[in-house]
Amino acid sequence: MSPEKKKQSHPAVRLPRSVYALGLVSLCMDLSSETMQAILPFLLVTSLGATGLLIGFIEGLAEVVSAAIKLVSGSLSDRFTRRKIPMVIGYGLSALVKPLFPLAGSAMAVLAARLLDRVGKGIRGAPRDALIADLVPPERRGAAYGLRQTLDNWGAMFGPLLAVGLARLGFEPREILWVACLPALAAVLILVVGVEEPPRAVPIKLDDAQPRPDKPRPLRGPLMELPRAFWSLVALASLMSFGRFTDAFLLLGAGRAGISLTEAPLLLAVMSGVYALLAWPMGSLADRAPAGPLLALGLFAQCIAHLSLAGHPAPEMMFFGATLWGTSMAMTQGLFSKLIAQLAPDHLRATAFGAYQLVTGFSLFGSSLVAGVLWDKLGPTPMFLFGAAAAALAGILLPIVLRFTRPRA
């Protein structure tokens, strides 16, 4: 390979500045969110009297609300050919509601704050993912999504570490939540200053469309225009999400392994750290390798992660499970984003991301409710076995689903 070609193959090459800026935005917002997430489950259980089912309901419902908003936001982004405006609104809303968490006096107040925060995430999610596809040519999208997820997960890793460090310094839980508000404000500032939206074609007016239809065409909603291959991919992603309930249960499961409340967030740091280390190279690999083997390996890692967490509750096994959990996410999530951008028509790209996130959000909601019931009634082991079984089922169905998935060139 010539030096020039070798240089062009590196994942850092040819990615626009705005992609890096979007990664920094995600880093700051995830630093804020994951610092809070490392504290909230314990605050809910110890101070606000929440049950496992209520925690599962709060986390699952928050994801459903976010997913539903993503579909609406994505459709509007496609219709008006704008990405940055809904992103500023979404990130801004999340930053504004962060102070509601330390002010919350009940589990229902936390639920209200969590829902508002997820509304902000829903507004920004689909336009952001579509903007990356707008900025980057198809042959580099795996690397671009991997880069954003790497920076996103650096924030997700440092958030729990920040929570642990502040707790060791004597900060109370609500004081830690106040500190976590600051990175969210930085995320909005970076977005406004550092992200530039590429010029896009104006929507075609009916009077200017060529050729003019001689016969009336049937009306079809944007979701009906998405190809069968796209929906096959979404079906597979929803199966994977059903085996990946909220990581709040990973924190709660740490207690039975002898991990203290102040040390438990390190599990999230390990999971996010592995995700951050692998997401970018895995995204670059997805630009060159077929999707099937990568998805199969990701599902295998997810299954083994749950089995290790369901086994003997030793701290080593908990951290091993968290490592495999992060590995599975790194191998699959950027690849799904790349495939969504590849399968969706250009004029429906944000709509496709919204539909994908809506279906997987409902799947995650269902799995979180099931996990909450299993946690309350039977304990952690059956809950993690449920996650392993769901991942195994997705692996069994993977070859069938891939037969119906034909990405366009």
Image: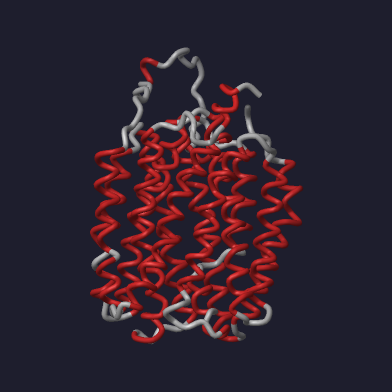
Q: Position of residue 102 (x, y in %)?
A: 26, 73
In the current view of this chain or complex, which residue is farthest to the top? 211
Pick the residue in front: 153 or 363. Answer: 153
Q: Quadrant of residue 16?
A: top left
Residue 47 higher or lower than 308, as above or below: below
- Tell me which residue sits at (28%, 78%) in the image: 171
> Which quadrant of the figure contains the C terminus?
top right
Q: Quadrant of residue 389?
A: bottom right
> Which quadrant of the figure contains the N terminus?
top right
Q: Position of residue 286 (x, y in %)?
A: 62, 40
Residue 387 higher or lower than 211, as above or below: below
- Tell me which residue sits at (37%, 38%) in the image: 77
**Left or right, 308 with reference to 197:** right
Instruction: State whether residue 225 appears in this view.
Output: no
**Left or right, 353 with reference to 178:** right
Colour scheme: secondary structure
Residue 133 higher or lower than 158, as above or below: above
Instruction: State whether residue 286 appears in this view.
Output: yes
Circle count: 0
Q: Position of residue 336 (x, y in %)?
A: 57, 45
**Left or right, 173 with reference to 161:** left
- Tell me which residue sits at (67%, 42%) in the image: 291
Q: Position of residue 184 (x, y in %)?
A: 29, 56
